[in-house]
Amino acid sequence: MAVAAVSVGAAHQADGDSDMNFDLKRIWSHLCTGNFTTRKHFPTDVLTEITSTITSSEAKHTGQIQFAVEPSLGLPELLKGVTARQRAIDVFSQLRVWDTEENCGVLIYLLEAEHQIEIVADRGITKLSTPEFWETVCVQMERHLKTGHFKEGVIEGIQLITEEIARNFPPKGASKNELDNAPIIL
């Protein structure tokens, strides 16, 4: 399994917070963010639209896109200093996004308490993409999140990733859907 991409939010955190273990502001943010917040930002109609966007996307290439949103991390993870990046890699593995036929699965992970986007791509994609591409996607999505436009951010991210995957993994007849297209709320 190979992973690629960056998180703009994680980069900012790494620059400013050397001791993530006892960051009370971070812990408070996670304690105040729960499923009610996620349902507010991602109601059923938005989840349906994201599912449709992923389904349409996957008709244009042989890659697989999975979107997962996690409201917050638990206290044990926060005390251990688990970052959004570390959690995204864990989710990538748990959801088996790496286990696609052409090694071209992509996970878009949102840690809602921190408004951090992580994109984890399998080795088939990372060989053909640049870190700058993934950074651009993260920046675009983060721009929407900061203004409260969660749906727009996720859909724009999916569309940008679709273009990249389609360029490198064009469709080959009827595509096989290897991952569920519905967003996953962890």
Image: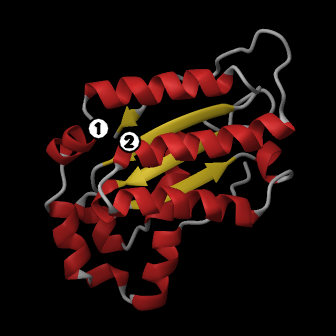
Whether residue 95 appears in this view of the structure is: no
Whether residue 175 appears in this view of the structure is: yes
Q: Residues within 10 Å of mark 1 (few under 14, many from 20)?
A: some
User: Which residue occupies the foreground of this view, 64 or 78?
Assistant: 64
Which residue bears the numbered disc 1? 42
Q: Residue at x 46, y 25 (%)?
A: 51
Q: From the top left corner, tell me how far across and down residue 184 is, in percent.
A: 40, 33
User: Does 21 sit left or right of 141 as displayed?
Assistant: left
The mark found on residue 179 in the picture is none
Q: Residues within 10 Å of mark 2 (few under 14, many from 20)?
A: some
Looking at marks 1 and 2 on the same chain, the residue that comes earlier in the sequence is marked by 1
Which residue bears the numbered disc 2? 151
Up/down of 78 relative to 88, above or below: below
Q: Residue at x 55, y 28 (%)?
A: 54
The count of marks equals 2
Q: From the top left corner, tell me how far across and down residue 114 is, in percent.
A: 33, 65
Up/down of 74 relative to 39, above or below: below
User: Does 10 sit left or right of 21 as displayed?
Assistant: right
